[in-house]
Amino acid sequence: MNVIVTGGAGFIGRWVVKRLLDDGHHVTVIDDLSNGQKENLVEFEGNNNLKSVVIGDLKNEELLEELFAKGDFSICYHLGASINVQDSIDDPRTTFFNDTVGTFYVMEQCKKRNIKVVFMSTCMVYDRCYDETGITEKHPTKPASPYAGAKVAAENMVLSYFYAYGLPTVVVRPFNTYGPFQKTGGEGGVVAIFINKKLNDEILQIYGDGTQTRDLLYVEDCARFVVEAGYSDKVNGEIINAGLGRDISVNELAQLIVQDPTKIEHVDHIHPQSEIQKLLCNYGKAQDLLGWKPEISLEEGVARTEAWIKEGYLLK
């Protein structure tokens, strides 16, 4: 198939592109590089199935029209977005226009050409988990940040195109994804940041008391989930979670990574109002509809991520 991946130069986007290329599809990428990096796609440069990497803004309707008119796409994997929760609180306008308005422009192109849309949402739209069975897709949403609010708005718009126009769409809500190619600085995820600090012999700083929990999904498991949601008609019109099905407190995660309590300190949370105290995924729906379940344990995923970050240091 010919497929397009928005945000394909980003962390998860890069792994989605790899999976699609491994499956033999012809892939076009569009990314404005506000979060993504060209370097993430370097290893695919010799692959004839990577048709083009377009540097451009999803809010540029003329560019989208030109790209979609000649692409003959079967599926649009829409991952392009502003993704930083803290930034969305400080600058909600940018997040809204990128995540909600940008999604509208993508949907219009897909509607015009009957292209299936796999929309990347987030577990951050949920209210906290209250029991050990985990968060299902029927769990209450609570957009505690403009990032989550923009994603909920975009989700509803994406699903409205399924109901109003019969356009095949699916909303995917991966839980906290980590792994190689994730940024190790302020825009990165907690696993990559903690590992980077450990390797630099720096103190790991934890926001708040560290009892907040996360369900951490290894990026290759996430990419497999996202890609297969595009292949299956069973999930059209649905919202689907993916996670490890196990949560860990940030305190426990820090200890797992650094294994030295003297290297850990607690600091005041920048935006405590947007913290979700407990996140635990119930991925039963993904297992039922897609036959998907995670394959990489947290310990294995952390080890792989650390090896990748170490390799980057050696190359420098």
Image (cartoon, helix red, strand yellow):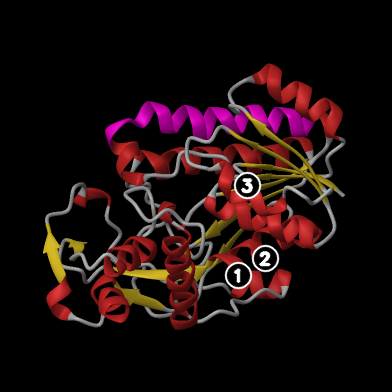
Of helix, strand and loop, which one carries label 3? strand
Q: Position of residue 19 (x, y in %)?
A: 72, 61
Give yes or no for contact between labels 3 and 1 (Cβ–Cβ under 8 Å).
no
The answer to which of marks 2 and 3 sits earlier in the sequence is 3
Mark drawn on residue 221: 1
Of 2 and 145, which appears nearest the observer? Answer: 2
Of helix, strand and loop, which one carries label 1? helix
The part of the image, by quadrant, that contains residue 252 is: bottom left
Q: Does the magenta portion include 95?
A: yes
Which residue appears farthest toward the top when viewing the image? Answer: 62
Report the magenta stretch's main SS.
helix
Of 163 and 268, which appears nearest the observer? Answer: 268
The part of the image, by quadrant, that contains residue 288 is: bottom right
Range shown magenta: 90-111
Amino acid type of the residue that numbered disc 1 sits on in the rendered structure: Asp
The answer to which of marks 3 and 1 sits earlier in the sequence is 3
Residue that appears at 48% across and 35% down: 34
Q: Which residue is mark 2?
A: 224
Mark drawn on residue 119: 3
Tell me how many marks there are: 3
